[in-house]
Image (tube, helix red, strand yellow):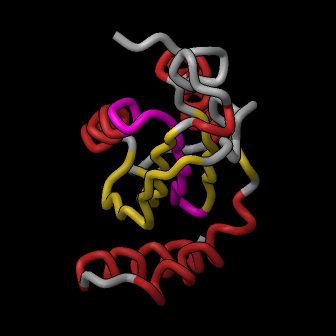
C-alpha cells in the first residue's frame, strides 16, 4: 500500500524524483451544465484529489471542458474511469498522456478552475495532431460549439 505525501508523491520520493502520469482530455458538457455545476465539480475535486495524489487544472467555457490531470498512474486512470461514467459530460477525447520523472506542473493545485479564454487554441492545436478520425471529428464539433457560444 502506498503512502502519499502532501503533494501526492509516494513516500520516500523527493518531489523532483516522482514518476508522474499526466493526462489531458477535452469533452462536451451535458445540456444544462453551467457555472454552478462546475463550482461543485471543483469543490469535489479539491476534497478528493489530494488523497489520491492528483493535481491539475480544469477549463470550462462554451459548453466544453478541458482538463489536465497529473499524479500516480493508477490514481489518474481510476479518475479517468470515473470521469468516463460521469453524465455531466460526453465525447471525451484524450489529447495527450505521458509518464515521466519530473516535477509537478500544478503541485499546489488539487484542482484549479482556469478562465476559458484559451480553450479554442488548445482544441485547434489538438486537431492538428489528432491521429484518429473519431477524435478529429469530436474536436471539430467542439470547436463549432465553442464558436457558437
Where on the picture, by quarter, is residue 55? top right
Left or right position of 149 against 63: right
Question: With respect to residue 107, does 34 lie above or below?
Answer: below
The x and y percentages for residue 121 are: 65, 78
Question: With respect to residue 20, does 53 lie above or below?
Answer: above
Query: In this orientation, does residue 87 appear?
Result: no
Front residue (pair 78, 83): 78
Left or right position of 86 against 25: left
Left or right position of 39 against 130: right
Magenta segment range?
Answer: 62-76
Where on the picture, by quarter, is residue 79? top left
Q: Indicate the quadrant containing the C terminus: top left, top right, bottom left or bottom right.
A: bottom right
The x and y percentages for residue 57 are: 64, 45
63 in magenta: yes
Query: In this orientation, does residue 67 appear?
Result: yes
The x and y percentages for residue 126 are: 49, 78
Q: Residue at 75% of width from left, 66% of height from top? A: 117
Q: Residue at 71% of width from left, 68% of height from top? A: 118
Left or right position of 99 against 1: right
Front residue (pair 56, 88): 56
Question: With respect to residue 135, does 9 lie above or below?
Answer: above
Question: With respect to residue 7, does 128 lie above or below?
Answer: below
The x and y percentages for residue 48 are: 51, 18
Q: Residue at 49% of width from left, 81% of height from top? A: 144
Q: Residue at 66% of width from left, 16% of height from top? A: 6
Front residue (pair 91, 82): 82
Q: Indicate the quadrant containing the N terminus: top left, top right, bottom left or bottom right.
A: top left
Where on the picture, by quarter, is residue 38? top right
Amino acid at each position: 500500500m502506498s503512502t502519499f505525501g502532501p503533494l501526492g508523491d509516494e513516500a520516500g520520493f523527493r518531489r523532483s524524483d516522482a514518476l508522474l502520469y499526466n493526462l489531458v482530455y477535452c469533452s462536451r458538457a451535458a445540456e444544462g451544465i453551467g457555472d454552478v455545476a462546475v463550482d461543485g465539480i471543483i469543490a469535489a475535486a479539491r476534497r478528493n484529489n489530494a488523497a489520491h495524489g492528483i493535481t491539475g487544472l480544469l477549463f470550462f467555457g462554451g459548453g466544453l471542458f478541458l482538463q489536465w490531470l497529473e499524479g500516480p498512474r493508477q490514481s489518474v486512470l481510476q479518475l479517468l474511469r470515473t470521469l468516463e461514467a460521469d453524465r455531466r459530460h460526453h465525447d471525451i477525447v484524450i489529447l495527450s498522456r505521458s509518464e515521466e520523472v519530473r516535477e509537478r506542473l500544478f503541485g499546489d493545485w488539487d484542482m484549479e478552475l482556469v478562465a476559458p479564454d484559451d480553450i479554442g487554441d488548445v482544441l485547434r492545436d489538438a486537431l492538428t495532431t489528432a491521429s484518429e478520425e473519431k477524435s478529429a471529428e469530436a474536436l471539430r464539433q467542439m470547436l463549432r460549439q465553442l464558436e457558437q457560444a
